[in-house]
Amino acid sequence: MRSRTLPVRSLSCDLVVVGGGLSGVCCAITAARQGVRVVLVQDRPVLGGNASSEVRLWVLGATSHMGNNNRWAREGGVIDELLVENLYRNREGNAVIFDSVLLEYTTREPNITLLLNTAVDDVKLSSDGAILAAYAFCSQNQMRYRLTAPLFCDASGDGILGFLAGAAFRIGAEARAEFGEALAPLEAAHDLLGHSLYFYSRDTGRPVIYVPPAFALDDITKIPRFRELRVTDSGCRLWWLEYGGALDTVHETEEIKWELWRVAYGVWNYIKNSGKFTGAETLTLEWMGMIPGKRESRRFEGDFMLTQLDVVEQRTFADAVSFGGWAIDLHPADGVFSAEPGCTQWHSKGVYQIPYRSMYSRNVPNLFLTGRIISASHIAFGSTRVMATCAHNGQAVGMAAALCVESKSATPRDLTEPARMNQLQQRLLRGGQHIPGIVASDPVDKAISATITASSTLVLDHFPSSGESAVLEKPMALLLPLKPGLTPTVTLQAVTTEATTLQADLWIASRPGNTTPDILLSSLDVPVAQGAASVSLDFDTTVEHVCYAFFTLQANPHISLALNREYITGIVTLTQKMNAAVAKSLVQTPPEDSGIDSFAFWLPDRRPIARNIACSIAPPLQAFRPENVVNGYARPWDATNAWLPARDDRTPWLMLTWPQPQTLSTIEITFDTDYDHPMESVLMGHPERVMPCCVTAFELRAVDGTVLAHVEQNHQTRYSLQLAAPVETTAITLAILAHGPALPGIFEVRCY
C-alpha cells in the first residue's frame, strides 16, 4: 500500500477533561461522583503531573509547609481525600506510591474513561466558537481518538485545548499600570517562571565512582548559588535548579530540559567528585528526572482576572468557589544562572477567595479552565499556581460541570446567576470544599433541624503539665477561641532563674478567619518572683465577636514555662519564628510601595515536637458544644466549630433527635484530620499515618438500636453512608468506638 491511516476511536461523554495533573484528576473525580460521564485525557503514563514520580514535587497549597499564618488551611474535598489516603499508605513520601493512589482513585470511578499517553492535537469548533470535538493521539497503541462532549475542561498546564480552540490567553508579566499591581514590572515583559528538574541519591554503604556524561555542566561556578549545595539535597529540595523563564516555555521545553539535564548532572558531578562533600563517597545517583516540572506558560482569560490586590487584600466575591494561600512566589527568569535569590515570597495575612469567573474561558463558551492556567495576572499566578490550590479549583470546576449537565443546557457562564451560584457553593461545601467565609446552609439537610446532644462535652479549663518545660527564648502565644464578652484569665506555670517581669499582650486578627495578630487589645507587665510561680494573665478586656485571640508572651530567657503534650482540635501554641523554606525573616518586611503587608510570622511546631503551653483557663472555654456539628463550618474558622467529648469520657457518643420521624437515606460526617498539617505528598516523612483526633472506629445506630453502619478502620476526613434502603427514625446516634491518641473531634454531621 502506498499509505495507511491510523484507526480512529470515537468516544462521546458529558465532559472531556484534558490534563491528568491533580487539577484534572480532582475535576474528573468530582464530576464522575455526581453522575457525569467523563473522559480524562493525560499525555503521560501516570497521573499527577508535577506531583507524579516523573517530576516528584510535593503537593502544597495554602498551608505552605506550616510556614505562614494560615492555620487549618489544608484544602478540602477530593485533594484532602487523596492526601489523607497517601499519608496512611505512604507516610515516608514515596512518589511511586502516590502514583498508585491517584491511579486507583481515578480508575475506580465507573464514570471515568482514562486515556493515558494520549495527547490532544486538534479540535473542531462550532460557528459560535464552542468546542464540538477534540482529537488526540496515543503513542502506545497508535490510536487516534475523537472525543465529543457538550463540555470541555482544559487542565493541561500549557493550555493545549484552549490554545487550539482559540481561547484568549496571556503569557509573560503584565505592566504595573494594567491592574495597579505594585509588584509588577513597569513595562510588560516576557519574564516567566522556569522549569525545574530534580534528582535523588542513595547511600550504598561502599565507595561508588561517578563518571559524568559528556554533556554535564563542567563549570559549577556558572551557578551563582553553587556554594549552597549540600550533600543531603535531594528531590524537590533542589527546586532552585530552574531554567527557561526567559525562553518560550511551551515550544522550547525540550531545549530547556536539556539545559536542566546539563545542570543537574553537573551538580551531581560536583557533589561526587569535587572532594568538598563529606559522605559523598558512598552515594550513587538513584534517579534523575526525565521531564522537567513546569511552572508557567499560558494563562487564559476568563470573565474575571485575579490580581495582586485580590490576593493581598483578601477581597471577597459573590462567586467564590475555592481559595488560595500560598505566597506570591516569583522567581528570576534566568533561574539557576541568576545572581538574584531563587525566589521572593510575599504572604498575605490569611487565605483569599478565588472566584468562579476565573475558571472558564471568556470567549469559548463551553470551555472550563483549571490548574495553573486559570484567569489570573502573572503576579497573582505566583500564588495560585501551586498544586493543592489547583486541585481545589479542579473540584470546583468538576462540580460546576455537573450542574451544567444536570440542567441539560447551561454553559459555564450561566452558573454565575445568583441562584445557580448558591447551589454550586452549597454542593461544593457538601463535598468537603472549603470556601472561606461561606456557610453551609443546605435546606434539605435534616441535621439542621435536629436537637444535638452528646455523652459529654469538653469544657477546657486547663492544659495539664506533662513534666516538660521550655525557656521563653522566643515570643510564644496560645491561640484560643473566644466568644463575645470578658476575656478569660490564663494562668501559667513558670520557673524563673531570678525575679523578673513577664510582658504579655492580647491580640486578635483584623479580619474574620485570619490568624495573623494585628489588633492589640491589651498589654500586661506581670512581676514574677524567683523560683516556681503561677503567673496570671488577666487582661480585663472584652472581645466584641467570636474570634481567635493570641495570648502572647514576650521573650524572657529568665523564664521557663511548663508544657503540655495534648493535641486539642482548634487549639494551638505558636512561636514567633520563620520557616526558611517560605520566608526570609521573623517579620515580613516587603519593599516600600510594593503593596504587600508587613507582619510577624507566628508558627506552630510540627508533631512530634509540638507542645501547648500548660495553663489553667478561667472561666473555662465552652468551645466544643455538640451543636457545633450543624453550625455550617467544617473546620476551625474564628472558632473550633467541633464537638469534643470530655477527657474522661470512655464511650463518647453524639445524638441527633427530631420531634417527628425522619426518612434518611444518607448520613455524612466530617472528622478532624488536622487541617493544619500540610501532608506533603513526597520526600518528607510524617510522624503518623492517622491524625491524632481522627475517629478510627464508630457505629451509627437508629433510635431502635438498629446498626446502620459499623466502621472499624477509618482514617479519612469524611465518611458518607449510603443506606441500602431509606430508614425512618426519630434519632440517630454516632457512637465512637476508637480514635487516635487525642480526643476525637467531629466538625459536621449531615442527614438526607
Image (tube, rainbow, N blue to C red):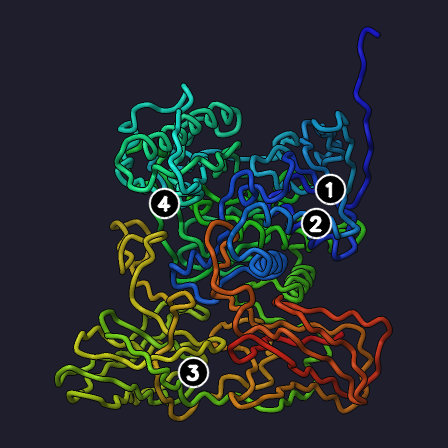
The residue positioned 52% from the left and 29% from the top of the image is 250
Instruction: Determine crowd level at label 3: few under 14, some 14-19, many 20+ residues with C-alpha closer than 10 A.
Output: many
- Any part of residue 320 in sight: no
Callout 4 amino acid: Thr
**Rendered residue at 32%/87% (across/down):** 541
Point out the tag, 1 or 3, that comes first from the N-terminus.
Answer: 1
The three-letter amino acid code for the residue at tag 1 is Leu
Distance of label 4 from label 3 (alpha carbons): 44 Å
Q: Secondary structure at mark 1?
A: strand
The structure residue drawn at horizontal position 64% and vertical position 51%, both measured from the top left corner, is: 101
Furthest toward the top, the residue is 2
Q: Earlier in the sequence, mark 4 or mark 1?
A: 1
Q: Nearer the viewer, residue 210 or 532?
A: 210
Provide the residue designation for mark 1.
Answer: 114
Query: Of the numbered discs in the image, which one, if any, rests on residue 634?
Result: none
**Quarter residue 604 falls in:** bottom left
Category of crowding for the residue at label 1, using alpha-carbon neighbours closer than 10 angstroms: few (below 14), some (14–19), many (at least 20): some
Q: Identify the image quadrant of residue 533.
A: bottom left
The 10 Å Cα crowd at callout 2, few under 14, some 14 to 19, many 20 or more, is: many
Sequence-first tag of 2 and 4: 2
Evaluate if marks 2 and 1 touch, with contact meaning CB atoms under 8 Å apart.
Answer: yes
- Give the number of the disc on residue 232: 4
| Residue at the spot of label 2 | 106
Which residue is at the front of the view, 694 or 738? 738
Q: Residue 368: x, y in percent?
A: 65, 44
Cβ atoms under marks 4 and 3 closer than 8 Å: no
Q: Secondary structure at mark 3?
A: strand
Residue at label 3?
482
The image position of residue 346, as x and y in percent, is 35, 52
x, y percentage for residue 551?
Answer: 32, 79
Q: Viewed as shown, does residue 609 lie left or right of 381?
A: left
